[in-house]
């Protein structure tokens, strides 16, 4: 099971990184905070101080077509905001 899906790169995520040293990641919906902490520490070689998670519900969309009502939905997402120990930095754009 891959725990870290991808880092989130947005204005808000970059602001949190600059202000608090907190990095945002999309993670597996079944992963808990302990697993996320271990995965970040192993992947980036940093010391994690705190992990906050939030789950986004799937969004449902519907449109009317000739064949009737077409309904679809997106996948459920889990986002983790990881705070690092003072002085630690993750270089998200580094190539491995």
Image (cartoon, grey):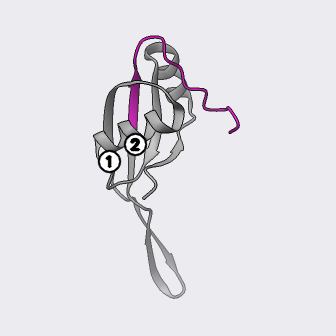
Residue 8 in the image: state x and y as whole percent: 53, 38
Label placed on residue 55: 1
Q: Which residue is mark 2?
A: 79
Cβ–Cβ under 8 Å for marks 2 and 1? yes
Label placed on residue 44: none
Q: Residue at x 47, y 39 (%)?
A: 25
SS assignment for the magenta stretch, majority: loop
Local secondary structure at mark 1: strand
Position of residue 95 relative to residue 28, above or below, is above
| Left or right: 30, with 42 as reference point | left
Magenta stretch: residue 66 in it? Answer: no
User: What is the crowding at mark 1: few (fewer than 14 residues within 10 Å), some, or many (at least 20)?
Assistant: few
Q: Quadrant of the N terminus?
A: bottom left
Most extreme residue toward the bottom, as rendered?
67
Give the camera-side residue of 48 and 28. 48
Q: Residue at x 46, y 55 (%)?
A: 2
Q: Residue at x 40, y 53 (%)?
A: 28
Give the distance between the C-alpha atoms of the residues marked 2 and 1, in whole angstroms: 6 Å
Q: Residue at x 40, y 17 (%)?
A: 85
| Mark before the other along the chain sequence, 2 or 1 | 1
| Left or right: 43, with 34 as reference point | right
Magenta stretch: residue 84 in it? Answer: yes
Give the camera-side residue of 66 and 95. 95
Residue 56 in the image: state x and y as whole percent: 35, 49
Magenta span of residues: 79-96
Position of residue 61 relative to residue 18, above or below, is below
Q: Quadrant of the C terminus?
A: top right
Numbered circles on residues, count: 2
Residue 45 in the image: state x and y as whole percent: 51, 29
């Amino acid at each position: 099971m891959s725990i870290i899906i991808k880092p989130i790169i947005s204005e808000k995520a970059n602001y949190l990184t600059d202000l608090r040293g907190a990095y945002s990641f999309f993670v597996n919906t079944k992963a808990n905070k302990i697993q996320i902490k271990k995965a970040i520490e192993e992947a980036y070689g940093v010391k994690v101080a705190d992990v906050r998670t939030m789950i986004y519900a799937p969004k449902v969309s519907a449109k009317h077509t000739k064949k009737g009502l077409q309904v679809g939905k997106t996948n459920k997402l889990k986002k983790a905001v990881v705070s690092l120990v003072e002085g630690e930095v993750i270089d998200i754009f580094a190539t491995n």
